[in-house]
Amino acid sequence: MLKDHAKIMKAIAASGEIIGRKKLQKMIYIAKKLDFPFHEKYQFHFFGPYSEELTLRVEELCNMGFLNEIKEKKGGYFQYRYSLTESGEEFLQLNEVDMPFLPACLADMNEQNARFLELVSTVLYFDNLETEEIKEKVFTLKSKQKYTDEEIEQAFQYIEGLKIKVTVQ
Amino acid sequence: MSYSTEMLKEEKVFKDPVHRYIHVRDRVIWDLIGTKEFQRLRRIKQLGTTYLTFHGAEHSRFNHSLGVYEIVRRIIDDVFNGRQEWNNDQRLLSLCAALLHDLGHGPFSHSFEKVFDLDHEQFTQDIILGDTEVNQILTKVAKDFPKKVAEVIGKTSNEKLVVSLISSQIDADRMDYLLRDAYFTGVSYGNFDMERILRVMRPREDQAVIKKSGMHAVEDYIMSRYQMYWQVYFHPVTRSAEVILTKILHRAKHLHEQFYSFKHHPAHFYSLFEEETTLEDYLKLDEAIILYYFQMWQEEDDEILKDLCRRFMNRNLFKYVEFDPAKEYKKLAELSTLFQKAGIDPEYYLVVDSSSDLPYDFYRPGEEEERLPIHLLMKNNEIRELSRESEIVDSISGKRRTDHKLYFPKDILKNDQTKSKIKKQIRQLLDIK
């Protein structure tokens, strides 16, 4: 029951707390691209890969009382923080999800900022293209973010690092 | 005259119950409509299993695709053309993307995608870029034209304004399906003043925006979207049909994996079972084919497959109770054990269905840059997000509604000829008579 919900809870539990909806979206997308069994459907949107299914699933978890959501004002916009509630932890203990390498990957991602994760997820979205074409996509589709060549290179290296984390452990 | 600008000698019109007429002058559009891949959409219903709840909902993806094309044509030809921010060189690209945006939908897409790990959007890309009649026509426009159309539909084109006409929170796709679904289901909730919205749309660099004076028409659109979700798209009976359909597919796949010998070989399903579906295999699927198998599987030896198919074909659906996962997940475990004791496989006959399992969404004001919201164009040329100006939209988008239901076959549970004590216990737990 609610296996896909439990996986999202596991991801948040493994991260301790995730600050920002955008960050949460990108972390799950990157994990999915690393072959962790998340089933939320993603599409490319203005700000990169985005899953409406994930948004709704998180809302359901908040309504069930399994997730804490704290809304806080930050400058001109709102930001949301997510963590597991006690009943969420209890539910997760009864519905254990086995994804052994996930915590290390998510902990690493959680240390990155949302802007960088947006870049990483965009690079992964176009991973069927050649490197130069991926760069072209980032420069045209993400022109407002003004990513540099160095940042894109860092994103590629970061992805390789995550892949090693998945295989080595 | 080049193929891309060639016009038909006489305009063709399709009678349409939603837009009255759909007008086609462009040769490319006319040729695309005639392809076998586009004609296939006639055999795929827009609303899947909804016809089992609202009997009028038999309209197809073909109807809807023409409708989306017509809306985009009106926006471009009647509203955007001549405005400084609009580049009319993108006209044909926009029309083709609108017409073809749902090309990769398969039969009962939602269930098929979940069970067989398919992605209709990927198939749309594959049809446009692969060895197909659609691709031949688009390639006649220009060698790179199929790629451009595919990128607009995939939302990865740098022509963001064109993308937003087909895919944004107020786009031609949603406007057509809300009006069309309301018409064919016979419900009135989906109606809104589309003509007014089109008149107040203005092109901007990244998206179409709405003049502030048109805000009330947009509020009506958001309300209709909200109402249609709860009254039609999330209807519990439709969800019951969808649950049974999904379980049929799971059962057939499971039987194949167990080397079960089907009386009627599921030739069209083999590549789906193996999750190696080619474009050629995929294009052979439509709802007539699937219903044919369901019809035949009513005579199978496997009791579960036979029963589920009979339920689907004869509309003997599962009943449901409201379910609160937070408070009742322990009860569900108990029910599952009792179902097993009663000889009713809970894997197929005790199903939790959540609103996040459904492929529809609500308006979101785009906090934290998740999705681009609807933007209003104020008198001073400033751009403001809709829910910051509209109290009605603010009140809807601030309130969350999620929903879970527990589905089960009430008729089996009420049949006391076998395991009557256990069934009584189940009925008590479910609080049904």
Image (tube, coloured by chain):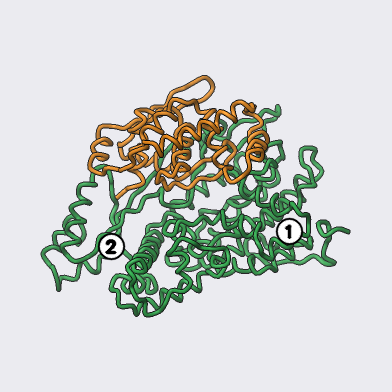
Chain colours: A orange, B green
> Is residue B213 in view from this perspective?
no
Residue B349 got which mark? 2
* Residue A44 x/y as whole percent: 57, 43
Crowding near the residue tagged with mark 1, few <14, some 14–19, many ≥20 C-alpha atoms within 10 Å? many
Q: Chain of mark 1?
A: B
* Residue A2 x/y as whole percent: 32, 48
The residue positioned farthest toward the left in the image shown: B421
Q: Are marks 2 and 1 in contact (CB under 8 Å)?
A: no
Q: Is residue A106 left or right of residue B80?
A: left
Q: Is residue A50 left or right of residue B338?
A: right
Name the residue rendered at 65%, 69% in the picture.
B36
Q: Quadrant of the N terminus of chain B?
A: bottom right
Q: Chain of mark 2?
A: B
Q: Which residue is at the front of the view, A68 or B210?
A: A68
Q: Quadrant of residue B248?
A: bottom left
The CA span between labels 2 and 1 is: 47 Å
At label 1, the amino acid type is Leu
* Residue B126 x/y as whole percent: 61, 57
Q: Which element carries disc 2, helix, strand or loop?
A: helix
Q: Which residue is at the front of the view, A78 or B129?
A: B129
At label 2, the amino acid type is Tyr
Find disc 1 in the rendering and name its residue. B138
Q: Quadrant of the C terminus of chain B?
A: bottom left
Of tags 2 and 1, the one toward the viewer is 1
Name the residue rendered at 70%, 27% in the picture.
B380
Q: Is residue B59 left or right of residue B25?
A: left
Name the residue rendered at 25%, 32% in the picture.
A86
Q: Which residue is at the front of the view, A13 or A133?
A: A133
